[in-house]
Amino acid sequence: MKYLLVVVGMFFAGMVAAQSKYESAMGRGLEQLKAAKTAEDMSTASAFFERVADAEKDKWLPYYYAAYANHMTGWMNLKADKDKVSEKTKDLIGKAEAIEQNNSELYCLRQMAAIQQMTVDPMTRYQSYGAEARAALDKAIKADPNNPRIYYLNGQTLMNTPEAFGGGKAVAKKLFEKSVGLYKTFQPASPFHPNWGKEEAEQLLAACQ
Amino acid sequence: MKQVATLLSLLLLAGWASAQVKITGTVKDNRGRILAGASVAVKGSYDGGVTDSTGHFSFKTFEKGAQTLVASNVGYKPVETAVTIGTEVIDLPFALREEISELKAVTVTAGSFEAGDKKRAATVLSSLDVVTTGGANADISAVVKTLPGAQQVGEQEGLFVRGGAGYETKQFIDGTLVNNPYFSSVPDLATRGRFSPFLFKGTVFSTGGYSALYGQALSSALILESIDIPERSEAQLSVSPIFLGAALQKIAKDKQSSWGVRYDHTNLVAYFAIVNQKPDYFQVPQIHASDANFRIRTKKGGMIKYYTTFTTNRLGLRRPNIDDPTLKNAFGLKNTNWYQNLSWRESLGKGWKMNLAASYSTDHTDFNNQIQNQNNQPVSTGQVWIDSTNVAAKTTADLSQFRAVFDKRLSGISVIRFGGEYMYFYNNGVYNNRIGLLRDHFKSLFSEADLYITNDLAAKLGVRFEHSSLIGKAEIAPRLSLAYKTGNGGQMSLAYGVFYQKPENSYLYATTNFGYTKATHYIINYLKNTTLQTFRVEAFYKKYENLVKTYPAYNNDGSGYAKGIELYWRDKKTIKGLDYWISYSYLDTKRDYLNYPGQLQPNFAANHTASLVMKRFVNSINTGFNFTYSFATGRPYYNFVKNGSKYDIADQGKTISYNNLGFSLNYLMSMGKAYAVWVASVTNVLNQNQVFGYNYSHDGSRKESISTPSPRFYFIGLFLSWGVDRRQDAINNNL
């Protein structure tokens, strides 16, 4: 009996350890992400999250961050092949979506990947990748209209779109205002859920004034 | 208790021994090429690493005992290796095999210029390219002429490709043949294409060796794919001294369907009053064009598309008669054309896809040529070679067709495709009271397989069967092409194909006792494509057989050849903001056809042709500047004179070389609630003399050069659009 108790006890202890192992890994990963200064740091962080995700199998957040960090390498490394980077980003988003369906944050990432690919050759790619980006944000809104990142991302895109094509600061400003407003009350579902973009939105709003 | 103690001590021991173990190695592909950024992990743990630029990885792990290492990289099949982790450093090489994917697989490119963003390569020709090519005035064919393989022929419409006449190039919209892609012919003038570039999302210009899905074109196929549902609802207004137009495009709220209508009126009265024209236009060109469309996305993601256009145009012009300068030739033309196309593509599940299309077009042309005196009154000279050029003619050309193509995906991304088409051609002509009637039930069956052996090697095998009831003959045309990736974005392609085409109606009216004309293509091509740059070199040999002869008898005794080499370079990278392409074609061709006395270089073929196209959009001033320079060496011209039982070359020569600098400017702005685009363009900026050939008098004593009706063509226009912009709807509703 005693023996059994010990075994059961160890089993529970093991579970708690596994839980905290995931949490501590996520914590470490987010630290890495925050501290990343170069594209290489970002890819290391991305690979770390991917390993966590592959090992956990049922958690979408590590895939989310793996995709996010991978996406960032496409901007940080000026020589990056943005198509290749985005192909990997989308692959990781796909894995996250297989676990967590219809998630606003994942649709936002899809928009970011599409915009990254559009910037390779905006004049020609505007029609295809621009549409892909818009479709992703439409889905993001349907999934959660109170996600502040939707309006931040849309504002950022429109700010860089010529006025003649419906962009410009005036249009973008409204979106940043909405985003900043939402950030004031936004609470992530857990310490590991996406919670970035507030400062960026505030900065871009200031730039639109 | 004893057992627990043992267990605890064991655990402690394990902890003690769990100093990290280093795992290192390399990741390469199955051909030994380094893979940077590949990841290696201990399966089920968080431990792992990423390969650096030399393909090496190195990481430490606490995991012990029998474990699995996984190496993975996007686009490659992951590889797992069992290892036993002890205390020693583990060093392992991994070799990953590429997955065959549509994005990575080689495409067969011999002979064709593919546009669109399907392969993410630097696109060759998009609708935006068409409207921003200097001097092309948004005419698809004019832009295609800046690509290698096409001749700078300015005295008649059509694409003259690799030693082929204009009628050897056919145009297809969503798979169906277009019977009258250009406005009706006028002697010594090139007319525009009927279709706006904005109707199409992709253009494939094939200069040879094209797919078994298409036939009845000896030289070339221009394959146009219409757009699906547009992005936004909008109203458009086009204003210019030459034309006025209005259009409406409406997209349903759910974005699953759309419809649109358009009307344009072109009238050159004002333009001709300002810009002097060499011919005397007694009927200034006028065009009424209208079109309508609807597009529906089906529940399963397929598309149903309908497009129709109705056009009428008329013109009349007088030019001096070459046999007697005191007389004039008055040429008048009236044309109506109705075209419609309905297509349906759908996925049928289990790897099956279906493409159905039907189209109907009817074209009516009235034209006449009258010999007139200086007072513009009809005269009879009594000289038969002058009087016989008095013509009154009426033609009707109808084409009804049905086409079905089925795709079945085989293993991987290989596809087998097969289908058939039925076309009914009805041609009725009255030429000076002589009546001709041609009816052709034309059937074809085709099958084609795209086989991907690896990502680096692909083959396209096809065969096409064609039968024409009019000439009562059938032929089988094989097609084959191969493509092999040579690395670093480069690839080699080979293509071979046999192409048949029935003789043109003008000869079939004389007799239907003809066989098919035939061309055999051999093409080798090297293409290097990176995101913003394309380099392409292609060499070809084309053998012509059974070409139409009209003298000494109407038969298929003609023959010929064409060979050459072509270069293309497009670069959007080197100079920021500048997009340019250079094309060069060398052509060596001779043919014996029609009344040619032997094998001669045809009068539509120049030996060297080159184009430089440059485009720059300056964001700070919202203005695009576009330049196109085209050059071609002189083309031969001949005067054949009948001498007893044969034709002799009474005179021959070469024209001066052809030079043309075209310029256009686009300025974008907003006017009230409208987006506005100002377009200004001019052809032949440098006013260079352009001679396309010569017309001879009956006795050969006089010859006159054929040139454009005025040295330059100017255009200025304002295109306004009021968008009911649905793109931001979802977001704006939440603001």
Image: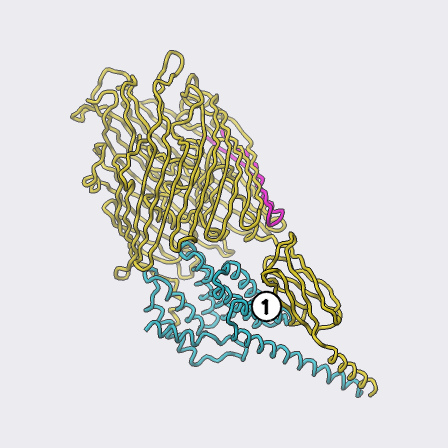
B579 relative to B672 in the view: left or right: right
Query: Residue B444 lies in magenta, yes or no?
Result: yes
User: How far across and down, in percent of the image, does residue B211 sit?
Assistant: 52, 40
Q: Which residue lies furthest to the top in this view?
A: B644
B466 relative to B275 in the view: left or right: right
In the displayed structure, would residue A67 be above or below residue B626? below
Secondary structure character of the magenta stretch overall? strand
Query: Residue B506 lies in magenta, yes or no?
Result: no
Question: The magenta stretch spans which residues?
Answer: B440-468
Which corner quadrant of the image does residue B318 belong to? top left
The quadrant of the picture occupied by the C terminus of chain B is bottom left
Residue B487 in view here: yes
The residue to which callout 1 is attached is: A47
SS label for mark 1: helix
B730 relative to B190 in the view: left or right: right
User: How far across and down, in percent of the image, does residue B134 sit?
Assistant: 33, 46
Residue B118 in view here: no
B532 relative to A98 in the view: left or right: left
Q: Residues within 10 Å of mark 1 (few under 14, many from 20)?
A: many
Which corner quadrant of the image does residue B707 belong to? top left
Which corner quadrant of the image does residue B597 belong to? top left
Quick one: A191 or B700, which is closer to the camera? B700
User: How far across and down, in percent of the image, does residue B683 sit?
Assistant: 29, 41
Chain letter for the cyan part:
A
In the displayed structure, would residue A50 be above or below residue B392? below
Type of amino acid at the residue the image marks with label 1: Ala
Chain letter for the yellow part:
B
